[in-house]
Amino acid sequence: MSGGWLAALRGNPIPWLLEADNPSVRAFTLTDLLARPASDPEVVAAQEAVMRSRPVLEILAAQYPTGYWIKPDVGYSPKYRATIWQVMFLADLGATRTEPIARACEHVLAQAYLPDAGLFSAHKRTTGTLACLNGNLLRALWHFGYGAHPIVQQVAETLARNAVEDGFCCRWNAATPGKEWLPCAWGCIKVLRGLAAIPPEFRSPTIEAAIAQGVDFLLSHDLVRADYPHADEISGLWWQFGFPLGYAADALEALEALAAHGAADDPRLIPAFERVLDKQDGQGRWLLETRLEKTWTQFEEIGQPSKWITLRVLRVLKLSRRLGA
């Protein structure tokens, strides 16, 4: 292999990622890693194959004609079969906006938005306006072309304002119900990734301030030890990489969030990068270590080399100027 970010690997996984068995990973590898334009014939063919891929077809096969999954409510429960999760998963897979997907997005906009809070909610009450939920939906809806929708714009502003004023504090990160809420690293990561979907020219001063505060928060703690404020105990999933992630986050997604905002080359992240690189096999691949259960489709097998995890790592390495991208 040549120099640059690939030099950090023990083998070259790019040909493996380009294999036809996972069209989503192939499409993302062409665009995100190899910088092919959307008009490139190989990218066009790969994107068309995404919509014919088993995960996309299995998710859409379970959808009701009017756009929802399971039942026509908010769409958060049950995890991970209700509507909200399918919109997130389809975006993660790189699906393109079709009529069924548009109906799903419109259902979320109509049913999950809480006008009084200016945020999406898991159950039509302010206690359900979780930062992780809103960050995930913000990223997914921008992916599907809803960035200019008034609700999406309002969610982005509210989410950013709350982050600036409350420092990513979450009611579920409190030692005792009703006591002081602590900042949530998972929520911060999801918010940063959601705000990263907004092109810089469309970011308000509040959004920029929230990004800066989120980056500072993640960098102010030891990413390896995950010594972020916590009410109970640090999740054992932090160093178990999975796809898709849902509301949880791992150390790799923290690096993804920082990389999306140009902060992946901070020297404080060197130990975290070293630990990530130590997890690769002899061919420059990473294993799937955890996955969500009760989904409409199966993404990959736990304990096997994972194209999704390898793609996630390589995206971060490519964005890290420290590693020679």
Image (spheres, rainbow, N blue to C red):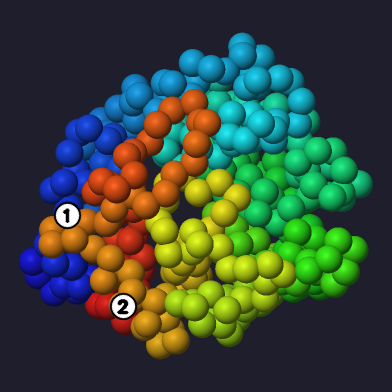
Q: Residue at x 34, y 30 (%)?
A: 50
Quarter of the rendering occupied by the N terminus = bottom left
The circle on residue 13 is 1
Q: Position of residue 235 (x, y in %)?
A: 56, 63
Nearest the camera: 232 or 291? 232
Answer with mark 1 or mark 2, whichever residue precedes in sequence: 1
Residue that badge 2 annotates: 274
Q: Work out whether 181 lies above or below 299.
A: below
Q: Position of residue 220 (x, y in %)?
A: 58, 84
Farthest residue toward the bottom? 267
Lateral position of residue 151 relative to residue 254, left or right: right
Q: Work out whether 199 lies above or below 87.
A: below
Q: Secondary structure at mark 1?
A: loop
Q: Position of residue 98 (x, y in %)?
A: 50, 24
Q: Residue at x 27, y 35 (%)?
A: 22
Q: Residues within 10 Å of mark 1 (few under 14, many from 20)?
A: some
Nearest the camera: 200 or 106? 106
Give the spatial CA distance, label 1 vs label 2: 18 Å
Where residue 196 sits, quadrant-wise, is bottom right
Q: Residues within 10 Å of mark 2 (few under 14, many from 20)?
A: few
Q: Position of residue 86 (x, y in %)?
A: 56, 32
Q: Amino acid at mark 2?
A: Glu
